[in-house]
Amino acid sequence: QTKFLISAPDIAHLDEYLPGDVGVEIAFAGRSNAGKSSALNALTEQKSLARTSKTPGRTQLINVFSLDADRRLVDLPGYGFAKVPLALKNKWQLALGEYLQKRACLSGVVVLMDIRHPLKDLDMQMIEWAVFSEIPVLALLTKSDKLAQNVKMKTVNAVRKDLAKFGDWVQVEPFSSTKGTGKPKVLSILNKWCHP
Ligand code: GDP
């Protein structure tokens, strides 16, 4: 029953637009083109809740969706798009770090990464910020249908090993929006975050 709630024009002004810091919020973050919109649509079973974009990095808009009166999903703008000017990138990262550190109702962050290109610098930074703020992370390896089963499991295990230093704060799961792979597991993790 996910519904669009509000948009904020950019992350620097997010706190002016967000509802009060109460209830539960789950943020979705990832590099442009990681498959974030597709995953949001697949997980909420809505065809076009989040718009899959043909021009990555074009918009800095942050969309907030409500699951119910107390619970929200926050679709953060894709990061790491080469054409975004450095000054804007830096500003965006600062604001994002602030959001992760200050938002008390933030109960989990889903960091989406293309399974073929996981753990880029900004992904690691995102994961570190969240864990340092004591927010659990689900590292979602998207487009898992693009890899053969054995390569897929090898990648998942390698990423798990790389993130093992974060202990229980970080879980790693493969996911495919097109095939539905990983969906029950992801929904169960999100459900736990929603009901602390
Ligand atoms: P976003 O920029 O992170 O929101 O990424 P999108 O959801 O717009 O997806 C980027 C591209 O990857 C699009 O061409 C999607 O069709 C494709 N894509 C997303 N998820 C999957 C998936 O699970 N499997 C496959 N094969 N392609 C996907």
Image (spheres, grey):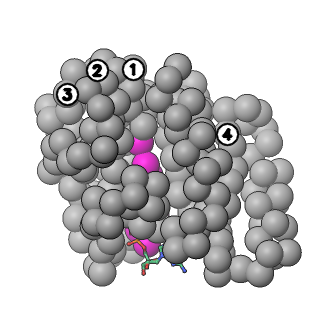
Q: Which numbered marker is on residue 21?
A: 2
Callout 1 touching callout 2 (CB < 8 Å): yes
Residue tagged by mark 4? 170
Dot 4 or dot 3: first in sequence order is 3
- Name the residue located 67 percent from the left edge and 39 percent from the top edge: 170
The crowd level at tag 4 (other Cα within 10 Å; few <14, some 14-19, many 20+) is many
Dot 2 or dot 4: first in sequence order is 2
Task: Find residue 184 and report its horizontal and vertical position in percent.
Answer: 61, 50
Above or below, 46 relative to 189: below
Task: Find residue 9 and report its horizontal and vertical position in percent.
Answer: 15, 50
Task: Find residue 179 and report its horizontal and vertical position in percent.
Answer: 58, 72
Residue tagged by mark 1? 104
Tag 3 secondary structure: loop
Above or below, 155 relative to 99: below
Please provide the residue range marked out in magenta. Answer: 27-33
**Magenta stretch: includes residue 32:** yes
Above or below, 162 relative to 155: above
Mark 2 Cβ inside 8 Å of ligand 1: no
Mark 3 Cβ inside 8 Å of ligand 1: no
Question: Residues under labels 1 and 3: Cα distance?
Answer: 12 Å
Callout 4 touching callout 3 (CB < 8 Å): no
Dot 1 or dot 3: first in sequence order is 3
Tag 4 secondary structure: strand
The crowd level at tag 1 (other Cα within 10 Å; few <14, some 14-19, many 20+) is some
Task: Find residue 192 and report its horizontal and vertical position in percent.
Answer: 56, 30
Dot 1 or dot 4: first in sequence order is 1
- Name the residue located 69 percent from the left edge and 50 percent from the top edge: 172
Dot 1 or dot 2: first in sequence order is 2
| Amino acid type, callout 4 | Val
| Amino acid type, callout 3 | Pro
Q: Which numbered marker is on residue 19?
A: 3
